[in-house]
Image (cartoon, helix red, strand yellow):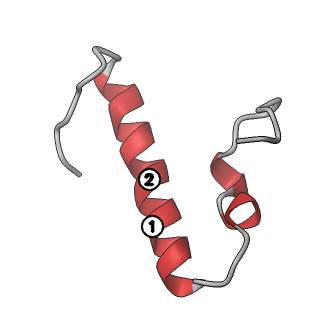
């Protein structure tokens, strides 16, 4: 993983974000016709507005 910390969040938050991004990219590559909300559901925060 890269060492990017653009927003000033803790490094742990940056790593968690990068992990979620990589997971989403892999899911999209492996399931190009899949529903993003379903494929990325392990990383969707509880209570996130459904429009996102």
Q: Is residue 10 above or below residue 45?
A: above
Query: In this view, which residue lies farthest toward the left?
Result: 3
- Circles 1 and 2: CB atoms closer than 8 Å: yes
Query: In this view, which residue lies farthest toward the front?
Result: 51
Task: Say what secondary structure mark 2 lies in.
Answer: helix
Q: Which residue is mark 1?
A: 25
Side (left or right) of 39 relative to 30: right
Side (left or right) of 37 relative to 15: right
Asked whether 33 or 15 is in front, the reply is 33
Task: Say what secondary structure mark 1 lies in.
Answer: helix
Which disc is residue 21 wearing? 2
Residue at position x 53%, y 85% in the image: 30
The x and y percentages for residue 38 are 76, 64
- Estimate how packed mark 1 is, as few (under 14), some (14 to 19) or many (20 or more) residues with alpha carbons within 10 Å: some
Q: Is residue 30 above or below residue 50?
A: below
The x and y percentages for residue 42 are 69, 53
Q: Is residue 29 above or below residue 21?
A: below
Q: Could you tell me how far apart the alpha carbons at marks 1 and 2 are, in whole angstroms?
A: 6 Å
Side (left or right) of 19 relative to 36: left
The x and y percentages for residue 41 are 72, 55
């Amino acid at each position: 993983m890269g060492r990017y910390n653009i927003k000033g969040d803790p490094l742990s938050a940056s790593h968690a974000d990068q992990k979620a991004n990589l997971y989403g990219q892999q899911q999209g590559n492996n399931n190009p016709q899949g529903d993003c909300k379903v494929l990325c559901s392990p990383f969707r925060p509880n209570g996130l507005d459904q429009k996102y």
